[in-house]
Amino acid sequence: MAEITPHPAHEVPLNRIKKGLLKSRLSHALILEGSQDVRVQDLALEMAAEIMCHGQTPGEKDPRIFHLTHPNVKVIESTKTAISKEDILALQHDFNQTAIEAGPKIYVIFDAEKMNGYAANALLKFLEEPHANIYGILVTSDALSLLPTILSRSQLITVSSGSNEAIFNQLIASGAPRQASSVAAALWHNIDRAQEAIESDEFTHLLDHIPRVLARDTDGPSILKKMRDYWPELDRDKGAVIQFLDVFMLYLKDLLYAKLKASDKAVFCEVSPSLEKTAEAYDYDALLTIWNETLALKEKCEKPIHLSLALDNWALMIERGDVI
Amino acid sequence: MRFQMNKDKLLYHLVIVQKALSNKTPNPALTGIKLEAFKDRLQFTTSNGEVSIHKVVQDPSLSVEAEGKALIPGRYFVEIIRKLDGQNVLLSALEDNLLKIEADHSDITLNLLDLEDYPHLLFKESAEVIKVNVRVFKSLVRQTAFAASSVENRPILTGVYFKLEGNQLTAVATDSYRLAKKSIELDQSYAATDVIIPSKSLEELVRILEDNQKDVELHFSPSNVLFKYDGTVFLSRLLEGNYPETSKLIPKEFPTEVVFNKEQLLVAIERASLLSIRDGQNAIVKCEIRDDDVVEISSSSPEIGRVLEELNPVEGIKGSGLKIAFSSKFLMDALKSFNSSEIKVGFTGEIRPFVMTGEYDPDSLQLILPVKTD
């Protein structure tokens, strides 16, 4: 790998790392979310170099980190279709031993979303018992595709060539609908991915459907029926369910904003009146419980479960008022 | 870099250092032998990321014309030197990262690896040097390391725990189903310290130690352990974490004690394991200590048949009879570790660990957990 020329989008995240190091408050696990256009893999190596050579000038950074040959920096590259449990165990085997050279030990996982369930769970065990002086940097284009339990134990750093607002403006300028642009920009922080989603019918239907799920209609269909009408059992695959849950959680966040009288932060900007009406129908704790249950369902999706049954069960639980 | 040296002597040192070369590594630099030429000596370094070997060579046949250093593709280099004709070999570093090897009528050019990518290994000796006779140290490793775990479920158990206390150096290894422990007495007392060395590193080390009366030097530090033997320095990383407290697991009193002839017991167990329900590594054999001073070793498989071996212990059985079952592999491994021809086995119960000791193996014991059978 060639020497790295800094990308303008790297400055803010690198400063965060430097501050964390100065205050000795750097998280032992970092998730770098971003796309190829901001060279997020290069940023991960720059961060590794920053951690390894803390306090030195940029010129003194060890070139072996960028050549992927530093003995204390282990990199899992994304050359394979999936990252397996064996890859993670090999990493852990190495990190259970003292460092070859003085200094911290760092692991970098490129394309962390390629970790299969076994690999993610093996990594989770490692994250649950953080060792002193071991840092992990997970690089992904989509943090929401990682296990929620990995997300909750890591510091998420989103790297984008522009802010969500800039992506939103770009999408609007390209003629995309306002609602879809707002949600896609908030969900992916990446113009290419957002554009791709907006162009799919599935995403457009999802945006129509989601505000209806929690809407309280006295004589209307149940949540279970709404879900089944919208989504026949046969069409429910893992990727689609996870995308549904991601957008649903954005909507839940908007309901919580509405409760806090901060609807201006909502990404479902075009359904503002109905959003506030729905928010009134639930109390704050109920929304938080739905949030937690949705997060738990998303985690279950990574395991070999019957997706339709799990989704029905989730809908029934909200319907029966277990969480309300 | 340019030097000339006797080919056989160069090969002798290369064969030693190549033991730490890496076969499969994401870092190509670790497939290389780092060679440094100084006016009066050569220095070789190899590393596979787990263990590293460093050797300083001073030889009357060595003549260094120009100092320098290079990272040479290890396997090719050793094989080339091995197959060369002629008494002496001339090595010179060329431009464009090339190495020229000349001997007799041969002229070979080898592409060098990038030295910049090589780890910065520090072969630092500690202030306190522990000297142990090489044979004694080899037996310390040979009698313990095999009992370390080979699976990574509990990484700490893949190592051998070395504890230095006064003039006693104790090694302990366990995979949680068996335990091996041996202590040796040192010539002098040292400050108390302990380290956990990966058993695989120790296996590599033992391969370069010869059977002679020389000493091997042990240098313990918090980040690594360094062994120095006959001009070769061997560096190993350590396992991080706390080793479990094992002393309480070893019973002190034995209601039943039997002294076996080692060879007789070994052969009987080998035969019995042939027809065990479980195959190979997991074969289970049963042992019945009868009140008439006979020990029955048996195993049976409903589909294949049954083996029954009767053994007469060397001495009369002390204590009451019992029936116990255990892994034949564990027992054979433990028996083979002893130098003694007679082995005393102390039993504490049918489902409790039993301990083996040998008359000519002082401060050495093997403990095995039995298995439950119907």
Image (cartoon, coloured by chain):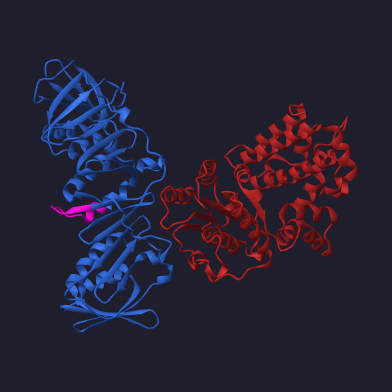
Chain colours: A red, B blue
* Residue B117 in the image, given as x and y percentages of width and height: 43, 68
Is B259 in front, or is B360?
B360
Q: Is residue B206 left or right of residue B152?
A: left
B168 vs B108: above or below: above
Residue B215 colored in magenta in the image:
yes
Any part of residue B322 in sight: yes
* Residue B244 in the image, given as x and y percentages of width and height: 37, 35
Residue for point 86% across, 49% down? A269
B272 vs A304: above or below: above
Point out the image quarter for the C terminus of chain A.
Answer: top right
**Residue A7 lies in what quarter of the image?**
bottom right
**Residue B70 lies in what quarter of the image?**
bottom left
Residue for point 31% across, 30% down? B247
B101 vs B338: above or below: below
* Residue A199 in the image, given as x and y percentages of width and height: 76, 58
Q: Is residue A171 left or right of residue B354?
A: right
* Residue B37 in the image, given as x and y percentages of width and height: 29, 74
Residue B80 colored in magenta in the image:
no
Q: Is residue A11 left or right of residue A102?
A: right
Any part of residue B274 in sight: no
Q: Which residues are magenta?
A: B205-216
**Residue A5 lies in what quarter of the image?**
bottom right
Is B217 in front, or is B262?
B217
Residue for point 80% across, 63% down? A170
Residue for point 42% across, 42% down? B241
